[in-house]
Image (spheres, helix red, strand yellow):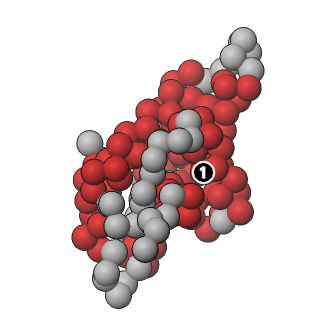
Amino acid sequence: MKAILFALTLTATAASPISLAQQTQKEVLQDSEKGASLYTSCMEGVRMLDHPAAKDLDLFGAGSCVAYVAAFRDALSITDKKNVCDDHSLSVGTVVRLYIAYMAAHPRLMDEYKSVGLYVVFRNEFPCKT
C-alpha cells in the first residue's frame, strides 16, 4: 500500500521545483524506510536466488525485497505511464540486481526513502520513448 501511495506522490511531485531527495532530507526516516534497508534485503534476495540451498538465508528479508519490488513495479505500471514504460520483459530478480548495482554506485541514496533509488532504476531501465 505504501508503494502505491508513494508512486502516486512521485507522479504528483515530478514537476515540482524541489526534488524528492530535497524533500525527504527534511524528515528523519526510520531505518526500515531507508534505501539501506531495502538494499540489505535485496542482497539477501540475490543470495537466495544464487544459493537456494544455503542454510543461513534470511528468507523474510529476501521475500520482503522481492515483494516490495514486485508491488512497486505494479504500482508504477498504473500510475507513471509518462516516465516509466516497463514491458515486464525483465524478471523481478533481474530488477533486484539492477537496484543493487545502482545503489552500490549511488550510496547517498541509502539514507533516502527506499522507493527513491528503486524509482530511478525503473526510470533509467524503462524510459518511455517520446
User: Residue 120 location in percent, x, y?
Assistant: 51, 63
Give the residue displayed 29% in from the left and 67% down from the top. Answer: 11
Q: Which is more toward the observer, 48 or 26?
A: 48
User: Residue 121 location in percent, x, y?
Assistant: 55, 58
Q: Residue furthest bottom?
A: 17
User: Residue 30 location in percent, x, y?
Assistant: 42, 53
**Can I make out residue 98 in this image?**
yes
Give the residue displayed 46% in from the left and 68% down from the top. Answer: 129
**Can I make out residue 26 in this image?**
no
Q: Quadrant of the C terminus?
A: bottom left
The answer to whether 73 appears left or right of 123 in the picture is left
Q: Quickly name the residue at label 1.
A: 99
The answer to whether 75 appears left or right of 84 in the picture is left
SS for tag 1? Answer: helix
Give the residue displayed 56% in from the left and 41% down from the top. Answer: 90
The answer to whether 51 appears left or right of 17 in the picture is right
Relative to 123, residue 15 above or below? below
Q: Quadrant of the N terminus?
A: top left
User: Residue 9 location in percent, x, y?
Assistant: 27, 64
Give the residue displayed 56% in from the left and 64% down from the top. Answer: 124
Relative to 101, residue 19 above or below? below
Three-letter code for the amino acid on which mark 1 is drawn: Tyr
Badge 1: few (under 14), some or many (20 or more) residues near its Cα, within 10 Å?
many
